[in-house]
Amino acid sequence: MYGGDSFHTLTVIARIGLVVLSVTLSCAALYLAYRLMRHRPLVVRLVIGSLVFFSFVWLSPQIHYSYYLLVFDGLPLQNVIKAPPTPVDIFDLLTFRERTTLSAHSKSLLGWGLLALSLPGTWPGS
């Protein structure tokens, strides 16, 4: 499924660094959502989870590109952030229909994790 993914073109060290970066960013997004969702009603938690996911999908490519600047020689210093994702883009991500890449599927899992975090019974002590 992921045989042609660009992840496999990286060296082992670069892959490890990319995984560490991606996991760190995902954990930061989950932690931020958790902190913002505390003591809020369900609807507000769902909105917060959705906004954190939207922001992650929109802004994280720049952080990943900054990592690639360290990995690859000769990449130009540039802004890779494009227009914000549309609701259709977000829906396609959440339904695993966007692309068959590790990046897209990882974002999908993060999106579902953020939505699950919004639900009652997922909070410590609840």
Image: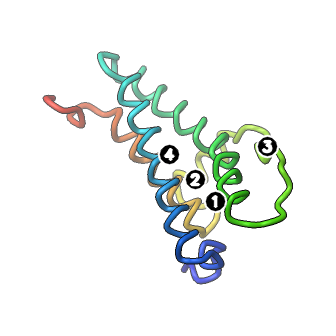
Q: CA distance from mark 4 to mark 1?
A: 21 Å
Q: CA distance from mark 4 to mark 2?
A: 17 Å
Dot 4: element: helix
Dot 1: element: loop
Where residue 44 sits: x, y (%)? 42, 20
Does 1 sit left or right of 115 as displayed? right
Which of 49 and 70 lies nearest the eye of the viewer?
A: 70
Where residue 4 sits: x, y (%)? 64, 81
Residue 33 falls in image quadrant: top left
**Are dots 1 and 3 in contact, CB under 8 Å?**
no
Q: In the rendered image, which residue does mark 3 sit on?
A: 82
Q: In the rendered image, which residue does mark 1 sit on?
A: 98
User: Could you tell me the amino acid type at mark 2?
Assistant: Leu
Q: CA distance from mark 1 to mark 3?
A: 16 Å
> Which quadrant holds the N terminus?
bottom right
From the viewer's perspective, is the residue at label 1 or at label 3 nearer?
A: 3
User: Could you tell me the amino acid type at mark 3?
Assistant: Lys
Considering every residue shown, the one lying at the far bottom of the view is: 3
Q: In the rendered image, which residue does mark 4 sit on?
A: 25
Q: Residues within 10 Å of mark 1 (few under 14, many from 20)?
A: some
Question: Nearer the N terminus, badge 4 or badge 2?
Answer: 4
Q: Of the numbered discs in the image, which one, if any, rests on residue 93? A: 2
Q: CA distance from mark 2 to mark 3?
A: 17 Å
Residue 85 falls in image quadrant: top right
Q: In the rendered view, would you say 101 is above or below 4?
A: above
